[in-house]
Image (cartoon, rainbow, N blue to C red):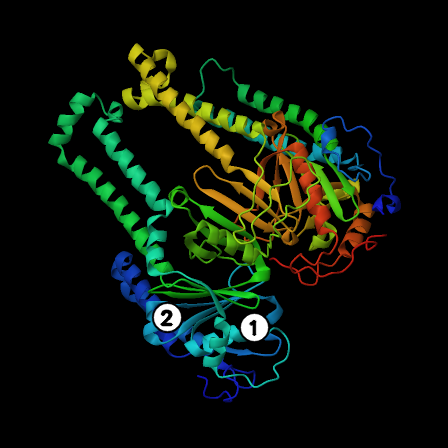
Amino acid sequence: MTEGAPRSSPLPTPEAPGRLPWAVAVLEGRNLLLGLAGIALVAGDAFRWWALGLGLVFVGRLIRLRLTLWWVTDESFVIQRGLLFRSRRVISRARIQAVDLERGLLHRLLGVTEVRVEALGGGSTEGALPGVAPAQASALRAELLLRKPKPRQREAPAPEEEAEALEGEVVLRLPGGEVVVAGLTESRLGAGLAVVGVGFEALRQGAFSGWFGDPESWAPAVAALPWVALLVGFTILVFLFSLVLSFILTVLGYWGFTLRRRGDVLAVERGLLTQHRETVPLRRIQAVRVVENPFRRLMGLAAVKVVVGGRVDAGNRRSGTNVLLPVGPRDRAFALAAQVSGWAPSGEPPQGEGEGQPPPPVDPGTPIPNLHPMPRGARARRRVRGLAFGLLVAWVVPALRYGPSALLPWNWTGAQGGLAVGAGLLALLVGLALAEGAWRGLGWAYLGTHAAFREGILERVTTLVPLARLQSVEVVSNPFQRRRGLATLTIPVARPPLEEDPRALDLSQEEAESLRERILEGRRPPGAGEMGLSPTPRSGMFIG
Amino acid sequence: MTLSGDLPTPPPESPESPESPEEAPRPSPTLRFLDPRVRLLWRLGTGIRAVVWTAGVAALEHWGGDRLPLPDALPPGALTAAMALWWILVLLLLPGIRYRRWRYALRDADLWIRRGILVHRVSVIPYRRLQFVDTRQGPLERWLGLTELVVHTAAPGTSGLIPGLEAEEAESLRERLARFAPEADDEGA
């Protein structure tokens, strides 16, 4: 497919466009087989006709794939498709956000790589090539990401060299053991095990028996009807299986995790069966999150994720797209977060004219931002929630034990009332403990060029936002917050739709206002410390 | 320099901000009200919705009333009456409150907008973050000579909304804001 291209340039040019190799027909054939299998299940007698239709579609797609041409010019990446209705998509290099390479098992057997080019402003992947020779894919990625719009002057190096050049310096490489730790400490797994434990206990106690009748009559019924026990056991097995599966998927997905940096581009390589190679240009990073779930917190571990602008599938379609560190020591996680978000703590506290003392200095070696706590009102709000939780439990538990009639408190007998009080008090204790944890989880800091916010009861998430990335600043307060003089400050950034904006929950209203003004004020002079900001003076620009 | 001096309509001063003085912006340029006619616009819009909803409930009660799980003691037409009463209250109270809450200010480097009745929201959008500035006019708005100004940044969703602007003022404001091209190296989607 590249025979036509001149040797000096491995990438297709407009004169000698690239074609997709025949191997992609096999990938397409897999879809055909899947479709046929699906139809065979439902179609019955009409299978023949459906199969014929599907076959025609398959042939059509093969022709379409074979007619797909692609090439690279000095300004853009171009894909041309179609026989009758010819479409040509031109993606200008300046708009390209990321070039991701993926190799599934089938891809590897066929010796091809899938290429996806993500561009600014696209609702979905803008340019996709289902299969390209691996060397060419690497060369394409290097070409599109590293050599920005400037014209090609020197001889392009051989693809292997080019691929080598993109590798860059290794920022971190996760040993297999740590990948296993990442899988084991995943909150899904831990939460799942806890649920299984509670479930077993509840079954043993017959907590739900009230719905089915008297507990004493229920137990023999189970003995008589082994299928009930079978069903329950089966459900639990399925659940456990899904947990194990999640563990295995994590380990497979992150196996060989390597983060590299070359210039302004980060590259992640990971995966045992399906190999992913993803790129994140530093200037597209809108915020960095350090995530500490309960298990990891106990072990002093944390994960690092980034919010990347213009990336449609971040953290969604293929989990892990935006993960820069699946798991690692807390210090290292924060150091990485500071590094990729461009935060360089000077060792001195930023001069804060606002209320509350400036946070103590931060050690540049292990840059964990020192956070201010939220006001007491924030704790009070969370305690109210704990109280509400206690009341809810007190109301619901008797009904769980004695059946729906106990949903009305005035029907309660003495025993039911006692159960309500006991369960309610227990829940209240749990609720208050969680409230305390939630309040301690909150924190904020203004770091001059950055802001740091933290929240989360069990899983604590610290978000580090480069203030140069803010699109606007919002201060929002609902009636409950106003009652206690609180407000939430949000910094909307150019995030993918499913991500959340960085926010400081339940600041005091004055703090929120002054923080907002400081953030906006700090952005105004075009400081050299702000990343990616053009140093155009802005004063006087807006005089009618 | 603020813009306040050179806009066509003299901005109504707002020394009184009875609801929440603590939310006044720091470098306080003029806080502007929306055009007062926006209340009429909102009332008309709410009125249309009120008629549709009330008619819907009336129809449901008339033809499907037997099948609804209602207490027998309820007199016929009670649901419709409750619906109508609710909408009358909404119609009487909300536009006025919303009008009083909704303010905006053109500060030196950013657009300041406050709105919200229960949930108060203050958005501050630096001019240099503006990606597009749209003006919108529905049929009712055209009839009243009002225009809605919508401000977008690179963050998803709408960043700022100023609904009741006198049409000419909105156009000139849009022109002026649109002159702020986003920064050359702008991040985001």
**Residue B89 point in image, percent of width and height:** 65, 23
Point out the tag, 2 or 1, that comes first from the N-terminus: 2
Q: Nearer the viewer, residue A33 or B109?
A: B109
Which residue shows up at 51% across the image and 33% down it?
A439
Residue A146's mark?
Answer: 1
Quarter of the figure with the N terminus of chain A: bottom left
> Is residue B161 among what the camera can see?
no
A321 relative position to A405: left or right: right
Give the structural element (helix, strand or loop) at label 2.
helix
Q: Amino acid at mark 2?
A: Glu
A531 relative position to B61: left or right: right
Judged by depth in the image, the label closer to the viewer, 2 or 1, is 1
Q: Amino acid at mark 1?
A: Leu
Q: Nearer the viewer, residue B158 or A248?
A: A248
**Residue A187 point in image, percent of width and height:** 38, 45
Residue designated by label 2: A28
A469 relative position to B18: left or right: left
Q: Tell me which corner region of the image, top left, top right, bottom left or bottom right, holds residue A274.
A: bottom left
Q: Chain of mark 2?
A: A
**Residue A327 point in image, percent of width and height:** 41, 53
Q: Residue furthest left?
A: A224
Which residue shows up at 70% across the image and 44% down it?
A518
